[in-house]
Amino acid sequence: MASDDTNASIRAAGVDLKSALDAFDTEPNDGHRRAIVEAAEQVLVFARDPSYKWMEDALEMSRLSATHLFQVWGGFGEIPEEGSVSFADLAQKLNAETSLIGIPPT
């Protein structure tokens, strides 16, 4: 069960979210849209189990590592500006296994 402090934080973030939504209803603009997103993110921060943040951080580090490796391999330069390239063709150009480049075939 969540602590009273957690419950209060979630409720306060919910109030901020409602205020941001009301402001957007009154005057829809990018600033109010950003305020909605920020308030909604705060609701999620307080509502999620603390272990979720660790998992989210680990996933982001994996994405950054994969993106860096793909850049080192020159993968972004092998993707045509127009048209398309299959994962298999891209893997061949990079001398890599297809499963390392894209979604493995089912």
Image (tube, rainbow, N blue to C red):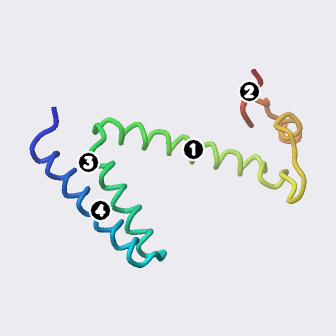
Marks 2 and 1, how far apart in space? 17 Å
Query: What kind of residue is marked 2?
Result: Pro
Q: Looking at the image, is mark 4 or mark 2 earlier in the sequence?
A: 4
Which residue: 29% across, 62% down?
Answer: 18
Please name the residue that numbered disc 3 is placed on: 46
> Where does label 1 land, which residue?
63
Tell me if 65 is positioned left or right of 89 in this view: left
Q: Position of residue 75 (x, y in %)?
A: 78, 48
SS assignment at label 2: loop
- Closer to viewer: mark 4 or mark 2: 4
Q: Which residue is mark 4?
A: 18
Residue at disc 3, secondary structure: helix
Residue at image position (16%, 46%) is 6
Q: Residues within 10 Å of mark 2 (few under 14, many from 20)?
A: few
59 is higher (above) or lower (below) than 20? above
SS at mark 1 in the image: helix
Residue 81 percent across, percent down from the top left? 86, 59
> From mark 3 to mark 2, how far is it between C-alphas?
36 Å
Q: Amino acid at mark 3?
A: Phe
Q: Nearer the viewer, mark 3 or mark 2?
A: 3
Q: What residue is shown with label 2?
A: 104
Image quarter (top left, top right, bottom left or bottom right) of the C terminus: top right
Instruction: State the separation of the CA atoms marked 3 and 1.
Output: 24 Å
Q: Mark 3 or 1, which is nearer the eye?
A: 3
For the residue marked with disc 1, what is the amino acid?
A: Arg
Between residue 17 and residue 81, name the one nearer to us.
17
Q: Work out whether mark 3 precedes mark 2 in sequence or the reverse, and give the earlier one.
A: 3
For the N terminus, the quadrant is top left
